[in-house]
Image (cartoon, rainbow, N blue to C red):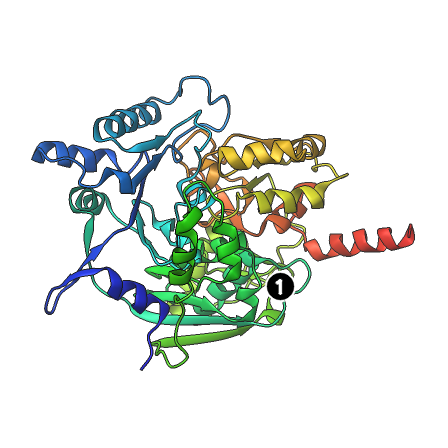
Amino acid sequence: MGKTLFEKIWEHHVVKEIPGGPAVLYIDRHFIHEVTSPQAFTGLQKRGIPVFRPAQTIATADHNVPTLNQHLPIKEELSRLQVEVLHTNCAAQGIALYGLGHPFQGIVHVIGPELGVTQPGMTIVCGDSHTSTHGAFGSIAFGIGTSEVEMVFASQCLLQSKPKLMRISVDGELSEGVSSKDIVLYILSQITAAGATGYAVEFAGSAIRSLSMEARMTICNMSIEMGARCGMIAPDETTFSYIKGRQFAPGGEAWEPALAKWKKLFSDDDAAFDKEYTFRAEDIEPMITWGTNPGMGIAVNAPIPVPNGTEEKTAFEKSLAYMGFEAGESLLGKKVDYVFIGSCTNSRLEDLRLVAEFVKGKKKADGVEVWIVPGSRKVEAQARAEGIDKIFEKAGFQLRQPGCSACLGMNEDKIPAGKYCVSTSNRNFEGRQGAGARTLLASPLTAAAAAVTGVITDVRTLLTQKTETAEAFA
C-alpha cells in the first residue's frame, strides 16, 4: 500500500519508536517569539545546558509588539520586558533574532515562508498554535507548549504520538468574490470546530491546487481551528516557484537536488486515510462567522442557523447572547465599528494588494476604524513601494507596522467591549480581540466591503457594481 504525504515525512524524521508510546521526532526548524520562549530558556539555565542546535532556531518579536511608533520604547511594561528578555536569551545562545527594526521582523508564520526558511519535507514547530501555516509547503508543522519548546532547545527532538490522517478535497472553480479564507470557513461550518480533532489534515483537490502559496497558507493556518494537529498541502510547481531565490532557500548547485527531493512529496494514489471529505468549490460563497468559535460560520447572505438539540441550543444561545444576535436573522446590514485586516492568516502582500485594488477610489464609512497591519517589514516595504499605502491613506485606512496586532488581546491594539469588528484573523472566541469585543471572521474582501459601507455587506454586490460601471464607460 502507498503512503500519504504525512507518512513519508513522519517516517523520515522518526529517531526512535517507543513501543506502545510516542515517537522521538527530529525537528528541522524551530521558530520562537517573545511570549512562549522565556520560561523555556529559564528551564535550560536551571539545568545548566545550552541550546543544542541554535542554527536551527529563528526568533522574532510579534505577539506583544505595538504596531505604531516601533522606533520608540514599548510602553506596556510586560511587553517591553518580554522583548528585552528575548534579545538577551538569543544573544546568549547564538540564535538569529529578527527584532523590532530588523528588515526581516514580522509575524513568525509570515517571515518563515517569505525568507525561504520554510521548505517542503520539513518538521517545523513553534510555541504558537498557528504553526500549521507552514504545512502549506508540504511540511509537518504544528504548535507546541512551553515545556516542549524547552525540549526542542535541549535536544532538537520531541516526543510525539502519530495522529490519524484525514484528507479534505475541494474540487471545481471558485466563484467571484470567494477566496481561500472563505474555503476554510466553509469547511469549518460543515465539519465544526472539532471535526478534525486528533487528525493531521491534507488539503487536496483542483480548487486547492489552483491557489497561490499565500492562499494555501491561509487554509493551513486555520486547520488548527478544526481541531487538527496540523494541516498540509502537497508541494507542486507553485510551491517551488515561490521558494526559488528566497533568502534562505537552497541556491546554486543545491537547488536541483533539493527540488528533486521535494518532487517526491505527495500522497500515493493508493495511500489510505482514516477519514475523507469532499466539497464542491461552486457551493462556497463569501463567508462570515456569527458566533464565538470559527465553526459558527455562514454564507454572508444566509440567516443565522436555528440550533438542533439541547446541547447545541445551549452553545448557540450563549454565543448569540455574547454577540447580540438572534437565530434566524440576517447579518447583512449590521453596523460595524472596526475592521482589522492582518494576522498570520491574512496579512501577506497578496492580501494587501487585493484590498487595495478593491478600495481604490473608495472611502471608508463614517464611524468605522480600519486597521491594516502587514505581516512583516518586507510586506510593509513592498506595499509602500507599490503605492498601496497611498491608496489606503486616501480611503481612510490606517496602515500600521508589523505584528500580531488585534488578532489577540495581548498588545495595545484591542477592540473595545461591545464593539463589532470584522476581522481577517483566525479566532472569534469571547474576548479574543479584547474584553467584551465581538469578532466576525471574514476574508479580506468581505472585511474591505464592511469598511467602505459601514455594515456587513455581500462583497459580490459591490464587485457587480464595479463591473457594470466599467462596462458603461467602455
> Can residue 363 be seen from the camera position used here?
yes
Q: Using the image, determine if residue 114 lies above or below residue 4.
A: above
Q: Residue 12 is drawn in which quadrant? A: bottom left
Q: Residue furthest right?
A: 473
Please rate how many residues cluster around mark 1, counting C-alpha atoms within 10 Å: few if below 14, some from 14 to 19, many from 20: many
Q: Using the image, determine if residue 433 lies above or below residue 226.
A: above
- Element at label 1: loop
Q: Residue furthest top?
A: 72
Which residue shows up at 32% across the image and 60% down it? 229
Left or right for 292, reference 152 = right
Residue 364 position in % (x across, y down): 69, 37
Residue type, label 1: Glu
Residue 262 position in % (x across, y down): 40, 61
- The foreground one among 122 and 126 is 122
- Residue at which label 1 appears: 285
- The foreground one among 89 and 416 is 89
> On the rendered image, what quadrant is the N terminus found in?
bottom left
